[in-house]
Amino acid sequence: MLSLAYSIGVLLALAGAMVTQGCRESTHDHLVQELLQRMEKSVKLDEPPNPSILLAMNLAGATHGHIHRWLLREIKKNAVERARTDMTSGEVALYILALLSSCQNPRCVHAMGKTINLIPILKQKMNEEINKKVITWYGESLDILALCLLKEYDNQDAVGAVAKELLNTGSSLCVDTQAMAVLALVCAYNHTDKQHLIHDALKAVTNNLLDEQKKGNGTIGNIYSMGLALQALETSSEFYAPRKWDRAQAFSVVYNHSYQQPMAMAQVLPPLVDKSYLNAGRWGCAATNGMTPSQQLPLPPMPGTFGVPTLPPSPPTAPITVQFSITNTLKNYFHYSTSVCVPDNSTLLDVMKVARSEKPDIFCFKTEHKSRGPYVTSIHGLAGNTTKRTYWQFFSCWSPLQEGVGTYKPKNWEHIQAVFSTY
Ligand code: B12
């Protein structure tokens, strides 16, 4: 009798576990679908193509829609037209990852009647940026990763420099940079004469990422660094062994956040489909290529397309007041403050535009379009500079913003400060 009750208990527990597992799987699949859909919807046909989005779509196997076709065509066109003249080495590296994951040969990109080889361009730009000291550790790691996936291993000095930097200042580099460096060094590990150095660096930095997760109760850095951090920890377990990674805790942070920004989605999608940027090379491409269309993730129609109704516009709400100040303490001190009145739900960019229209001599500013939206290059005539490593940094009170001016929406009476800073 007792054993019957025990067996029933075990069966019930098993059934419960299967239901929970099933639920988790369906939540997971639903999230992947939703992120893919939102990401696709964010693609604007009148803006430059974003290689990180094409890369994420390829890794997730969403390669059969018209958006994918458009992105690939535009990426090739842009590569041919702009790679040599107006891209940084990091941008060229991202283009290479996007092309590789699309089963295209970056050595022979053909568009608009022209053909170029991106590899010598990347190498030349990388060397120039290193010599001029304008490269970031994130950019250098991205370059190493792209070259490594192309089986180009003649940049051992750069590999060694990244490893040494991780050992020197492991924790003072931001989480995104640490994670990108992990991906680069994991790739380079088996093709280097510096295995001991790389091993030590990977051990230090991956342990640091695990410590960050513990400190942040699952969050590694901030919500926007999670994508790269998950990719890094997923691919480097041999370097933090025997320590174990609480993978479920880290993933639950991602499950509980509703990502809206295309770049954030593009970085978080690969780990959700068990992939990382390391899969952008031949393996990832072959895996995606070998899939039949039915194995690929189907994309349900998006609102506003194919007859699915769009949501009605929300009713207008009362305006809000935002305090905005600009401060430069680095050279030729200045500090100005103003209050502006904007409609509720306005972005910081809207706030800055109102400040500029009210006091153009003081609050004039310039932006450049980047993959994450508008990047503020100068305020009050003072521009950031890659050689001097200066930029305009944004704070709410004294906390650095975790979003750019194009997406951050200040609250009523919030005090936003733009401070000319170094990095
Ligand atoms: C390096 C870096 C910087 C450097 C860039 C300098 C340089 N010469 O490279 C500096 C320190 C200046 C910087 C500044 C900021 N950054 Co930043 N940065 C990064 C990092 C680590 C790598 C970006 C990169 O090189 N990508 C590779 C290249 C090839 O791609 P790219 O598209 O050409 O990259 C350029 C742009 O991304 C631009 N950029 C860098 N940061 C930001 C932020 C925003 C909002 C925009 C529009 C552009 C931008 O600079 C890059 C180089 O030109 C990313 C991490 C990540 N996960 O992506 C964070 C990251 C993009 N930055 C972030 C933020 C929040 C900022 C700031 C808004 C911080 C602040 N409180 O002021 C400011 C920008 C303010 C402004 N003036 O508009 C967030 C964005 C989060 C989000 N919601 O999208 C990230 C993801 C870091 C994070 N996890 O929080 N950043």
Image: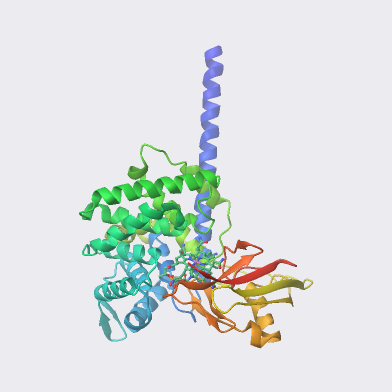
The quarter of the picture where the N terminus appears is: top right
Residue depicted at x 52% and y 14%: 3
2 and 406: which is toward the camera: 406
The x and y percentages for residue 392 are 55, 73
Vertical arrangement, residue 200 with respect to residue 321, above or below: above
Residue depicted at x 51% and y 30%: 14
Residue 359 is left or right of residue 419, and the answer is right
Residue 354 is left or right of residue 286, and the answer is right
- Report whether residue 86 is seen: yes
Vertical arrangement, residue 261 with respect to residue 245, above or below: below
Toward which corner of the image does residue 321 lie, by quadrant?
bottom right
Toward which corner of the image does residue 270 lie, by quadrant?
bottom left
Vertical arrangement, residue 7 with respect to residue 94, above or below: above
Residue depicted at x 51% and y 70%: 372
387 and 193: which is toward the camera: 387
Vertical arrangement, residue 60 with respect to residue 90, above or below: above
169 and 127: which is toward the camera: 169
- Report whether residue 25 is seen: no
164 and 89: which is toward the camera: 164
Number of numbered discs overlaid on the protein picture = 0
Q: Residue furthest right?
A: 318
Query: How did the renderer colour the structure?
Result: rainbow
The x and y percentages for residue 60 are 41, 59
Residue depicted at x 34% and y 49%: 202
